Amino acid sequence: MNKFLLFLFFTIAGCKFSIFDSSKIGDLQNEISPKIKNGNEVKNYFFQSDLGRVSYSVGYLAGRSITERFPELDSDAISYGFRHGHEGADSLLDSEIADQIVDKYRKALIYRKKILKKELNIKNKKIGQLFLEKNKIKNGIVNLKSGLQYRVIHKGTGPKPISIHDGIKFEFIAKDIYGNVIENSRIQHKHGFMRILDAIEGISEAFLMMKVGSEWEVYIPPHLAYGVEGYSGIEPSQVIVVNIKVLDIKKLPPRKKQKQKRFEQVWRKYKEAMQQSIKIQKKILKEKLIDDEIIDS
């Protein structure tokens, strides 16, 4: 929460001239009023001043942040504790006991996440392997040595990239193997150029084979995607299916030395992380086999 509150403070501080400029209050009210969802009673109580609006926004953002991180917590108890702390009242719990309770809860969450991640790795690895095994024998599927699979939807007639340092402009829709959309650049209007080497390995490998105008469906195993850690919206060891359409390519200017050095450091760490992910996957599988033997015996 400290990082969140710091971000919130600097956001409000950075906006103070526009929010509290009296000449712009009318514009602000006209802009905000249509977005208020709880009726005139709440509007009249909280939103008569900019400070009231900011206060509500701070509470709302803090509440949303807490719910995203700790969804099972009691919102009434949180509100009660927040009011006590904000008003400077004595806590109903001794501070030392409160610290112990929160620390114990935090450790329990970490343990639960660790167990869940392990279970997801085992489950997704098994399901993903089965999916790729069935998929590779389907008509039109091309299988590469790396484990990447793809299907050509439309053959492009334009130029093809010659280097991982080339820039590429593309559209994509990323899904899981069940067809659930993870990200859609066409909705989010993400159509800028990016360097091919900045993409995950599976996408980079596909880009280097695609001509401008091409549209492919690419099936990416976890070791060419986000490994055992996963990513936002992508579970650990999950196969992802990406529909890619290449719109344009161009040669990008060299990175500035400082940025290039920083990128190389990040890229090296990423490669090391991927290698570590493979080791962890093998370890998890070994532990699972041992557990199964113990259960069977």
Image (cartoon, grey):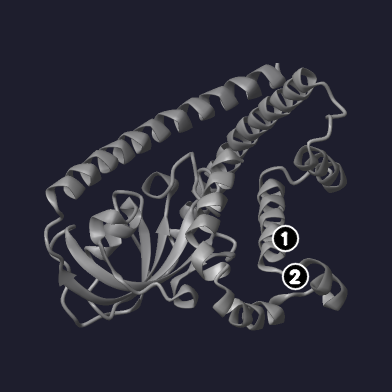
Image location of residue 6, percent across then percent down: 54, 45
Asked whether 69 or 24 is in front, the reply is 24
Q: Label 1 neighbourhood size at 10 Å, few (<14), some (14-19), many (20+)? A: some
Q: Is residue 152 above or below residue 102?
A: below
Name the residue rendered at 56%, 52% in the picture: 8
Q: Amino acid at mark 1?
A: Tyr
Q: Amino acid at mark 2?
A: Phe
Which residue position is annotated with label 1? 56
Q: Is residue 143 above or below residue 84?
A: below
Contact between marks 2 and 1 (CB within 8 A): the answer is yes
Where is the N terminus found, in terms of image quarters?
A: top right
Image location of residue 208, percent across then percent down: 22, 63
* Image quadrant in which you'd find residue 28: bottom right
Which residue position is annotated with label 2? 47
Q: Is residue 133 visible?
A: yes
Q: Label 2 neighbourhood size at 10 Å, few (<14), some (14-19), many (20+)? A: many
Identify the mark at residue 274; answer none if there is no mark. none
Image location of residue 54, percent across then percent down: 66, 61
